[in-house]
Image (tube, helix red, strand yellow):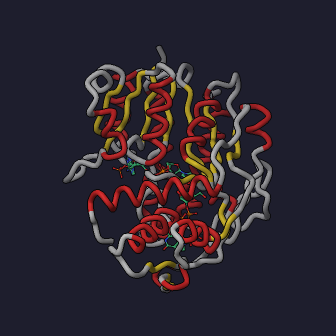
Amino acid sequence: MKKALITGITGQDGSYLTEYLLELGYTVHGVVRRASSLNRERIESMIGNESIYGRTLFLHYGDLTDSSALNRILEKVQPDEVYNLAAQSHVGISFQMPEYTADVNALGVVRLLDALRDTGLAGKCRFYQAGTSEMFGSGAPPQNEDTPFLPRSPYAASKLCAHWMVVNCREAYGLHASNGILFNHESPRRGENFVTRKITLGAAAIKLGLSDSLVLGNLESGRDWGHARDYVKAMHAMLQQDSPGDYVVATGETHTVREFLDEAFGYLDLDWRNYVKTDQRFMRPTEVDFLRGDATKARRLLGWRPETRFDGLVREMVDADLELLSNTKRRI
Ligand code: NAP
Ligand code: GDD
């Protein structure tokens, strides 16, 4: 039975990856941060299940800013695979917290890679780094593994540092370390301050009479949006290859924020133009205008393909938010 360690297990991707690895028969260990209130909603169904929690799923307190804790956890768990998903993952907020973003997203990876070497795991354990299409920034689409990186935010710059640290560890020490260059992926578990979830929650609230407007930023940017459930399978597949590598994971289809609004509000028979306002506070000092990924390499070498299409993704998210708000009557 293989053992995986996941940082960022409480996040969107961490929760889907945990479900997937447990289904495959893995034992999963997750790193969780201390917070004043517990933040385990996305993995609650698993930690509330006595046949899983404490048997095939374990949690450990740690933080990417705390190298001694990372060392202790690695020493104790002795994982076969490490998935580094933990990050300050909000691009907009990274402009307000560049130092913290770099500390977690860039130095955090340095700490983890060093810890793998210090604990003697570097030769035995495989490593996945959650890289991002944001690193392409203003690079011309369609973006693939050969597209130059032109980062446009502190978030993207921090992830680019992590990317090259992984490449260097691979080349210098032979570590089986791979960079996933994942394009945007969403789900009903997406954080509420990312644009897709903001829209599906906002549309559901308006439909239920719990809100009468939605305030957004730039409606013109284009993103290649897929489903997180599909994307975590590519992460796992990368670590099953004989050799490590870097892979773009994307659908190859781009939609603007405006088109996302069309799809979400249209599904509820609403015209978003009657409700959506824009405000400067949600605009970024530098924006990534257009992303479209070319995942040919992942298709060819990993056999990976996205299973969920854009309209299915949006509808699944809207349905989930309708249900959530109907049950809680939460005003947003
Ligand atoms: P997410 O929902 O924001 O989850 C981030 C996770 O990181 C959470 O579990 C969070 O813990 C944890 N975390 C944050 N700071 C930490 C720290 N200092 N120490 C330890 N854990 C920390 O992000 P996601 O959408 O699942 O994305 C997963 C990873 O993929 C991230 O690295 C992100 O940058 C990258 N990525 C995401 C996408 C996408 O479209 N979703 C695309 C490309 C790359 P709390 O729950 O305690 O906050
Ligand atoms: N968050 C947010 N909130 N974005 C808005 C809003 C708003 O109110 N209004 C418009 N947008 C625009 C942003 O300016 C951006 O162009 C686009 O919607 C998508 O924004 P986000 O949903 O915040 O995602 P992102 O593309 O910046 O970053 C996500 O994808 C990256 C992969 O490309 C995050 O998941 C990153 O962690 C990930 O690396």
Residue depicted at x 80% and y 50%: 146
Say whether residue 225 is left or right of residue 34.
Answer: right
Residue depicted at x 44% and y 78%: 214
Residue 38 versus residue 241 in the image, above or below: below
Residue 194 location, x and y as percent? 48, 64
Residue 311 location, x and y as percent? 63, 57
Residue depicted at x 36% and y 45%: 42
Q: Nearer the viewer, residue 171 or 225?
A: 225
Residue depicted at x 37% and y 48%: 65
Residue 254 location, x and y as percent? 71, 62
Q: Nearer the viewer, residue 186 or 154?
A: 186
Q: Nearer the viewer, residue 157 or 290?
A: 290
Q: Nearer the viewer, residue 99 or 139?
A: 139
- Ligand 2, seen in the image, is in the quarter at bottom right
Q: Quadrant of residue 210?
A: bottom left
Q: Quadrant of residue 172?
A: top right
Locate the C terminus and report the quarter of the image it occupies: bottom left
Say whether residue 289 is left or right of residue 332.
Answer: right
Residue 246 versus residue 236 in the image, above or below: below
Residue 78 location, x and y as percent? 42, 21
Does residue 108 appear in the picture of this structure? Answer: no
Residue 317 versus residue 331 in the image, above or below: above
